[in-house]
Image (cartoon, rainbow, N blue to C red):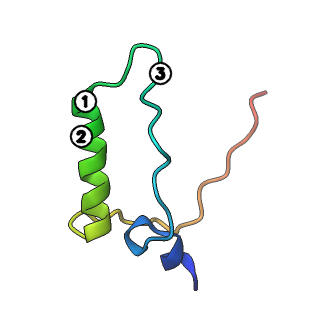
């Protein structure tokens, strides 16, 4: 089972670089919140629970 190696906390995944050049900009406070949460996930302070249940089926709009 290799799922652990695709998780942020295990170093298998990371957030993409945030494009700070977007029109209108991104508030520094939001950038800080994202960075803080990512660090909490990596350190194990914040755990994201994984729901491995089969998702419900959906039907196309008629």
Circle 1 crowding by C-alpha within 10 Å: few under 14, some 14–19, many from 20:
few
Q: Residue furthest front?
A: 21
Q: Quadrant of residue 25?
A: top left
For the residues bearing labels 2 and 1, Cβ distance under 8 angstroms: yes
> Looking at the picture, does residue 59 appear above or below residue 37?
above
The residue carrying mark 1 is: 28
Q: Residue 39's x, y, as percent?
A: 27, 59
The Cα–Cα distance between marks 3 and 2, rounded to whole angstroms, is 17 Å
Choose between 13 and 17: the one closer to the eye: 17
Location of the C terminus (image quadrant): top right
Q: Quadrant of residue 27?
A: top left
What numbered label is drawn on residue 12?
A: none
Q: How many marks?
A: 3
Q: Residue at x 59, y 64 (%)?
A: 54
The residue carrying mark 2 is: 32
Q: Quadrant of residue 9?
A: bottom left
What numbered label is drawn on residue 22?
A: 3
Q: In this image, 25 relative to 16: left or right?
A: left
Q: In this image, 12 relative to 25: left or right?
A: right
Q: Residue 36's x, y, as percent?
A: 23, 50
Q: Secondary structure at mark 2?
A: helix
Q: Residue at x 60, y 54 (%)?
A: 56
Q: Residue at x 46, y 69 (%)?
A: 7
């Amino acid at each position: 089972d290799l799922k652990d190696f695709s998780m942020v906390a295990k170093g298998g995944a990371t957030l993409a670089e945030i494009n700070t050049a977007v029109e209108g900009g991104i508030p520094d406070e939001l950038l800080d919140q994202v960075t803080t949460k990512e660090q909490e996930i990596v350190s194990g302070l914040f755990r994201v629970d994984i729901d491995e249940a089969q998702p419900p089926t959906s039907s196309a709009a008629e």
